[in-house]
Each structure stands twice: as structure tokens, then as C-alpha cells.
Amino acid sequence: MNDTIAKARDLLGTVRRYWSTPPEGRYMTYKEILSLSFGGNGVRIITYYLMSLMVSVGNAFIGNTIGIPPGQIYVIWLISVFSSFPLTALRARMIDTTRSMKGKYRPYLLTMGLPTTVLACLYVWMPYEHMSLFFKCATVLVFNISFQFFYNFYADAYDSLINVLSPNSIERSDVLSIRSVVENFAPSVMNFAVPLAAKAITGENTLFDLRVFRYIYPPVFVLGFLVSMLVYVNTEEKIVQAKTHVAHMKFLDALRAVAHNKYFWVISLAGWLGFLEGSFGNIIQWMYNYQNACTAAQYSIITLISGNASFWPNLIAPFAIRRFGKQKVLIFSNALNIFFIATMLPVTRNTGSPYIIWMLLTCLFMNTFMTALGSLLTPSVNADIRDYQHYITGERIDGMFATVGLIGTAISLMTSSILPTLYDRAGLNETVAASLGYTNSYDVLYNQHYFVRICSVLIIASIVGAVLNVIPYFFYDLSETDQKGMIAVLKIRAMFEDRDNDNLTDERKAEAEQIIADAREYCEKDPAPLSKAHGKAGRRENKALRSENEKILIARRVRDELNKYTTEQGLLQLDIAQKLTAAGPDGYGQVELPDANTLKALPKTTEQEKQTRRRLLMLLGDVKAAQKAMKKDFPNGIVPFDEAIFDRLFKSEYENEVQISEMLKKLRAAKDSKSAERVAEYNQQLRALQKARTQIGKDIKTAQNESAAYYRAAKPYLDALKTIREAGDYEECKF
């Protein structure tokens, strides 16, 4: 008993110690972690229930409840997807150009969450029962196009926030595990409660009655939004980037940059190839709704158990990642998915058994367990991929990943007819429904023969999708140690950039100097083989050896970065840079560069050699693109852009935000004191400040466009200046 009390006191002391200050080597306070996790319940409620309303082939709300046939749903889905192309590009642009005290993603939890909530509530309360089919389709289409922007922006802001809350990959994985445990509590409770509430509202075992959506969903959406504000209020973004850095990339520049990120393509390909994997998703719900396989109370228990399957992977994921790495965990979980999906096939073919839904639940539980284990890694993997992008290009362009991801949307358009075709061929269509005396296509599922036939086809399709999904993961070789090494290099680069711009803090300087000192200490050591000893002593020894080996590998990456201008490729890159700068911003196009074949013949045995070789090859394309931009934007010669304008604008922006914040406090105090005169005065001042903020935003956008045009036209020359500056910085501390 005393030991338990002592442990509780120690835990409480740890929480107090790190509530506002992160532990050593970490970046997130306990307050941030808990706010992210508990606030995530609100986000997950909104995303979970809104996804069940958004248009997709087989959507129960649109098909069963509203009564729109699959063919029309498919057309609505196509139009909605096409609308996502410009909206996603706009979203990406907004994210990558966001300059706010609140960060890159946090502001959108509020500005996109509120309209998402309002739209979702209106969506279920439209008078569908009094509409013709045409007006039903038009209404669903308008709302879903709106969701393509507001909802996707809101969900992406929350999911991507972890990318910038910490640059530590292991910490991100740990926090994601904690977040996933906590944030799924509310959806799990709702999964249990909704079937019982639906029974009370309708008096029947149905989830598809319009009253269920109208009376249950809006309160859930509003509550979810209010809870999600915990994330908005109590987190702080931390990006490893020079404080003076200004993004120069335009849309096409960013697209070209992301195109060179091999890990982005590996992970994206896994998703694109596995589009059929989730085909079986509606089967257990269909079994309850159409085959009366259980009561409402039993189905509530089933959904609770099924949802609980995603809880347990959160407990083992951090240990699995540390022990085996993300790649092995992804391959293992996705390979087992194939097996558990396959076990559903014989189960669904025995619909006469009273235990069928429980047997199917067992298969579904294991599948959900493995899917959750893999999905838990997805945000962490995406964050690592963005760190890699920052490492190879020097730019943080998170938003553009969504834009390049539109390629996946285009692929989905090409493959989207497959699932509706499977539905139709299996018998889920109006013709079969009419032959059986039904008016709704989905009522075919009341027929046992067609139910088994349709389910079997969907399960086989899911197996094919799962097999295709696992293959790309064999090519994902970005380890946790690689990520730590890249972050160390990014910190050194940011330190030098801030120092060169006279904006270096003592904290950032000390951190970079410590990284370099550690690299000098460990870079000449050799990684030691792990011990073969067993038991606790062996595990402790191997833990220490892994830590030591990791420090050695990180040190070597730092050493290679600081020594890169002493290698054959580095000297060539520096020589080319000197020639480009000597030619000036208007004459770089006349400099004779090595041809592509010569550059391809350069050594590529080390990671650093590969990186430099890639940059030199990209330089050839940059020169051609820059000359085109010069002819377009600077036909009479390049006019340098004064970057100092950003200092003035960003300072004005910061001061304006502080003034607005203070004015809002004064306004609240005036309202509390019921001083109508002061309320009117402060409202007038607030409107003036907001007007000034709008103008500052326009000025920043204009400056960013002018800067991007200049940078695009003079990119080879400006990159050459950066190379020479960097080589000079690295000369101070080369090994």
C-alpha cells in the first residue's frame, strides 16, 4: 500500500514538473500532450460521424436514408472529387504561406472547425422527405463540395499538427499513442450509445432512419467542436527553421520539390494500390440491419468491442517502433491484415448460424487491431517524410504534399468505377431489387442469397487490396536514426542562417554547438554488435548499445554535412556556385555547366554523395526554369527584391495581433461592466485593427509573390550565394 502511494506521489510530482516545461530531450509539455489528447476526442467525434454522412459509393445515409440510388451517388462523388482539386491547391497554398503567432495549423482548428460544424448540422436537417430526386442530389452535392474544403481543412489541420509540435520522431510516436488511447474514448462511447438511442427514437432496430441523424448528430457535432478547442488553446508549434527564413516557393516549384521525395511516393503508392482493402467495411452493419443477426443491445456491445480493437495497439506501438522500427511494424501489421480479411469469407457464407455475427466480430476485431497498429504509424511516418523534404530542399512545404496527393485522387477517379461495378455485378442494383419486389437497391440485402453473394465479392476485393497495399512498404527505409540525424543537420543549418541574419538566440546557438561537439566525440567510433546475453541484464546492455550506436550514426551524418564541401562533389558544387555568382543574377544562364551524363557519372556510394549529386542534377533543370521565369517576369533584367520588407511586415503583423488580443480583453471587460460607451469605442478600435490586419495580410501576400517571382528567376544565382555562404560557415567547424 505504501509503495502504491509512493508511486502515485512520484507520478504526480512528474506531472507537476513537466506540466509547463518539457522533459530533457523532449519538446512537448504534459499540458500540451493532454490537451492534444483530450481535445482530440472532439475532433474524432466530428470526423467519425461526418465521414459517415459524406458522399461515397455505398454510403448508408445518402443511399438508404435519403434514398439516392448508387448510380447517382457515383455521379455526385465524381463532381465532388473534381471540386477537390482547386480546393486542395488553395488549402496547400494557405498552409504554406501562413504567418501567425498561433502557428501553421492551429488557426485552422477554429476557422475551419466552426463552419464545418454548422454545415454538418444543417446537412442532416434539410427537408429531404419533401424533395424530388433531383433536389436531393443537388443538396447533397452542394454540402459535399463545401465539406471538401472546410471539413478536409479542419481534419488535415488536426492530423498534421503533430508534425510541428515536436521534431523528435520517437516523441511524436509516443504522443500519437497517448493521443490515440484518449481521443478514441468519446467515439467508443458513442458507438455503444447510438444503437440504443436509435432504438429509443424509432422503436426499431435501424440506424438509417432520418430522425436518428437529426436528433443525435447535431449535438454531437457541437460538443465535438467545443472540446476540440482544447487543442487550439493549449498547444504550441515548434518548427526547426531559421526565424528569419521566408518561403520563396510558388505552387509549381513546390510540386517539383515534392516530386523528388522518394518516401512520399512509397507511402502514397501503398494507399493508391490498396484502395479496395476497405470494401468489406459495411458488412457487419448490414448483417445487423438487413439479416437481423442480433438485437440492438447486442449490436451496441458489438460496436463497442469492435471499436475497442483500436485501443490496444496504442499500448504496444511505442515499444514495437523502438524495438523493430516503423518499416517492420508496417509490413507485419499489413501482412496479417490479409489473413484476417480472408477469414471473413467462410464466416459470411454461413448466415444461418446464430453465432455468425460474433464470429465475424472476431475477424473484424483482429483486422481492426492490425489496421489500427499500421494507421497509428501513419501520422508519424508523414511527419518523418516532411522532415526529409525539409532536409533535401531546405523548405518546409507541408501543404504541398496534399496538392501532390491529388495525383492519388486522379488515380481514384480512374479506379472509382470498380467498386460500383462490383456492387452491380454482385446484385446490388435496381433491376435485382425490382425482381425481388423492393424499391430501394439496398433492400436486396434482405435476401440471404444476394447478401452472401455481395459480401463474398467485397471480401475478395478487400483481400486483393490488402495484398497490393503491403508491397510498397518493403521500399520504405527511412529509419528513426536517419530522422534524428536529419533534424540535427537542420538545427545546424538554422543556427547558421539565423547567425548570418543577425537573429541568433543563445539557446539555438548552444544547441547547435552541442550537436557539433557530440558529433566530434562519436563520429570516429564504430557501432558495436548487440549482446547475445538474455534476461534483464542483456536487455539493459542492448538498450545502452543501441543508444550508443545511434549517436555514432547521427554523428557521422553531421560530420558528412559539415565536410560536404571537401568532397569531389562538394568541391564541384562550390566551383559551379562561384562561377554562377561571378556571372551575376542576369548572366548565370551563360555559365557553362557540366552536362547531365557527367553529373550522373559522379560517385554515389554515400548518402552525402547522393544528395550532392541530386542537387547538381536539379541545378540543370533549375537554370532552364529560371531563364523562362526571367523572360516572363523580368524581360528588361532582374530587379533584386529587398527581403528586409518582410521584417517590417512581420513585425507589423505581430504587433497588430497583440493589439487585437488586448483590445478583445478590453471589450470583454467593458461588456462585463455594461459600459455601452466603452463597448462602442472598443468595437470601433477593434474594427480599425482588423482592417489593418487585412491590409497587412494583403501586403505580405504581395511581397511573397514578388519575392517568389524574383527567387524563381534568380534561383540558380541565389542558391549559389547560399552555397558559398554555407561553405564558409562549415569551414569554421569542419572535421
Image (cartoon, rainbow, N blue to C red):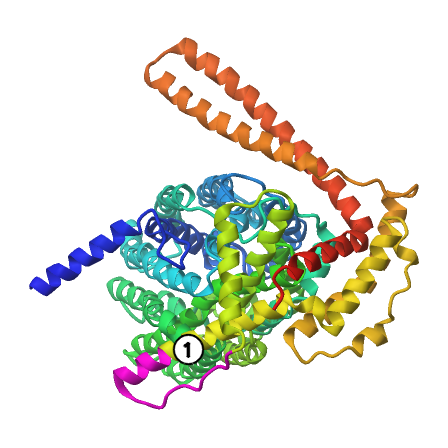
The part of the image, by quadrant, that contains residue 376 is bottom left
The part of the image, by quadrant, that contains residue 266 is bottom right
Disc 1 marks a residue whose amino acid type is: Arg
Secondary structure of the residue carrying tag 1 is helix
The part of the image, by quadrant, that contains residue 656 is top right
**Residue in the foreground of this view, choosing between 191 and 127:** 191
Q: Is residue 502 magenta?
A: no
**Residue in the foreground of this view, choosing between 481 and 264:** 481
Q: In which quadrant of the rendered image does the C terminus lie? A: bottom right
Can I make out residue 460 in this image? yes
Of all residues shown, which one is farthest toward the bottom? 532
Q: Position of residue 27 (x, y in %)?
A: 42, 54
Mark 1 highlights which residue? Answer: 546
Q: Which residues are magenta?
A: 525-543
In the rendered picture of this protein, how many numbered marks are placed on residues?
1
Can I make out residue 428 in this image? no
